[in-house]
Amino acid sequence: MKQVLVDFFVIGVARGGTTSLYNYLQQHPAIFLPKVKECNFFSEVDSLDKEVYLKPEKNKEYHMKIIQDEAVYFSLFDNALDSQLKGEISPSYLWDRNTAERIFNHNPNANLLISLRNPIERAHSHYLMNYQTGHEKESSFEDALKAPKNNIWGGGNMYLEMGMYYEQLKPYYDRFNSENIKVIVSEEWTRNNGEALNEIYNFLGLQSFDALEVDTAHNAAKQIKNKGLLAFLRLEKIKRPLKWLLPEKAKDKLKDRWFYKEGEKQCLDPETYRRLEDHFREDIRKTEDLTGLDLSGKWRIRNNSNLKTIE
């Protein structure tokens, strides 16, 4: 088995632009990323989707796998050139508290890139994604927040918990040199339409790359239409034959055409937003102290309120 040293990791957050980062970074000729966008090798997470545990086929693209075999993981880098930086992107690496130590043991000099998003907007986007994929049954965000917790990574409803960034970031700051950690704000770098990538390339020690295609939106939440038919097609006995008949990209195009509405999405209730500001305020303050970033200002989180925290 060929041992590979991974040079950098994009470790989060979920619904924080990691899919866009994957698509942008892999265009740079000096960077190699696996065909599996989320490998989840260094974290211990699980999923409601049984297909993510299946061994990836060589040179076939996947959005997510849970790879537990070392030989399978390192084989994903077989096509990397010696001159290329080898990277990996898995948002679960921020969520799993033991991943920092595992990555440190693999490469204590690895560079770590973390894209943070307003935790309220992140939670709402996470809910919309789960509703879109059929994992979430509640038709409103407020009802989903009150529902019993399913603490599973793939398809779970930890909407607020995954936005408590301080405890997730702390293990990395405890182990790695702060110079090896770069925290970026999703709302800022996505607004720059990819121009901020030069700053990321500089962090990775690379020259800028001008021939970058940044106009395509990646992994955006959509509204569902034909929900009953979509639920039927997601049944295991129906889904498995379709998996072998259609390649991943063809299935995505069909789903976009028949099941999702572009440009429509459920809006976040203003009172819910204000209550969630209270819920996240202290964690944001601690995360600001840890990272040195003015997150409250960037996310326009108010300094105080008399509303109660959502339980």
Image (cartoon, rainbow, N blue to C red):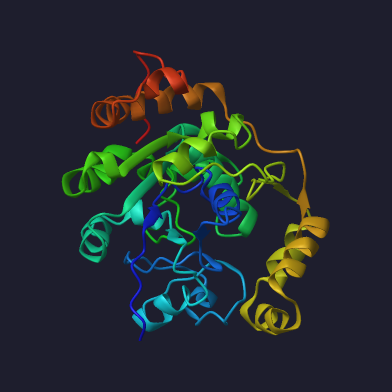
Image quadrant holding the C terminus, namely top left
Q: Is residue 71 left or right of residue 51?
A: left
**Residue 150 position within the rendered picture, expressed as x and y whole percent measured from the top left:** 40, 58
Residue 142 makes an appearance in the image: no
Check the image and report above or below for 163 versus 98: above
**Residue 134 position within the rendered picture, expressed as x and y whole percent measured from the top left:** 61, 59
**Residue 249 position within the rendered picture, expressed as x and y whole percent measured from the top left:** 72, 67
The residue at the point 74 percent across, 38 percent down is: 264
> Looking at the image, how many numbered discs can be counted on the residues?
0
Q: Is residue 260 left or right of residue 303?
A: right
The residue at the point 52 percent across, 56 percent down is: 30
Check the image and report above or below for 181 versus 105: above
Most foreground residue, 213 or 171: 213
Most foreground residue, 193 or 65: 193
Q: Is residue 105 left or right of residue 64?
A: left
Residue 133: quadrant of the picture: bottom right
Residue 271 makes an appearance in the image: yes
Most foreground residue, 228 or 125: 125
Q: Is residue 24 left or right of residue 215?
A: left
The residue at the point 64 percent across, 53 percent down is: 132
Image quadrant holding the N terminus, namely bottom left
Furthest-right residue in this view? 257
**Residue 95 position within the rendered picture, expressed as x and y whole percent measured from the top left:** 34, 52
Residue 165: quadrant of the picture: top left
Furthest-left residue in this view? 174
Most foreground residue, 166 or 151: 166
